Image (tube, helix red, strand yellow):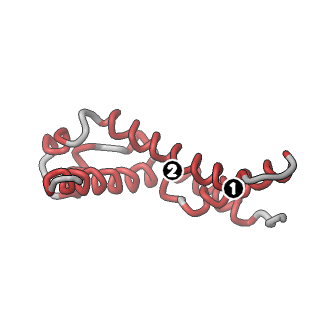
Amino acid sequence: MSTPRQRYRDQVRSEIKQIALVQIGEGGAAALSLNAVAKQLGVTGPAIYKYFRSRDDLLTELILEGFDEVAAAVRAAAGEGAPRERLHALARAFHGWAVANPHLFPVAGRHALARLRRLPRRA
């Protein structure tokens, strides 16, 4: 069981990551600024360093969480059957995950996602 302090810390870390994802979605990883995240969160720039040691640590955590999410979606869809059907199920799962998470892609990636949405769905 976590303490109230740990729950608060987890909540603030989650808010930091959500703000960071919006920044990345708008301008790519280069647009991520800890000072801008802090400003949006309503704290000072140095306060962010209580939760993440550096911009790279925050970025690394976001990348790892993204990989975990897509891996879980693909694993859930793998199922049983012939290799061809499993491959199609995996591709559909990845496609579904990508379309459901446009905020994880920079602006250039959103154009590719828009094209993916227009592709005909196959069984």
Q: Amino acid at mark 1?
A: Ala
- Please name the residue shown 59% across and 46% down the image: 71
For residue 10, the mark is none
At mark 1, the secondary structure is helix
Split into 4 quadrants, where in the image is the C terminus? bottom right
Name the residue carrying label 2. 106
Residue 73, image x and y in percent? 60, 54
- Please name the residue shown 45% across and 53% down the image: 25
- Please name the residue shown 40% across and 52% down the image: 21
At mark 2, the secondary structure is loop
Give the left or right position of residue 102, taking residue 38 as reference: right
Task: Say few, some or many: other residues with alpha carbon within 10 Å of mark 2 (under 14 / 14 to 19 / 20 or more).
Answer: some
Residue 87, image x and y in percent? 79, 48
Name the residue carrying label 1. 77
- The residue nearer to you, when weighing 113 against 62, is 62
- The residue nearer to you, when weighing 15 against 27, is 15
Give the left or right position of residue 98, taking residue 44 as reference: right
Split into 4 quadrants, where in the image is the N terminus? bottom left
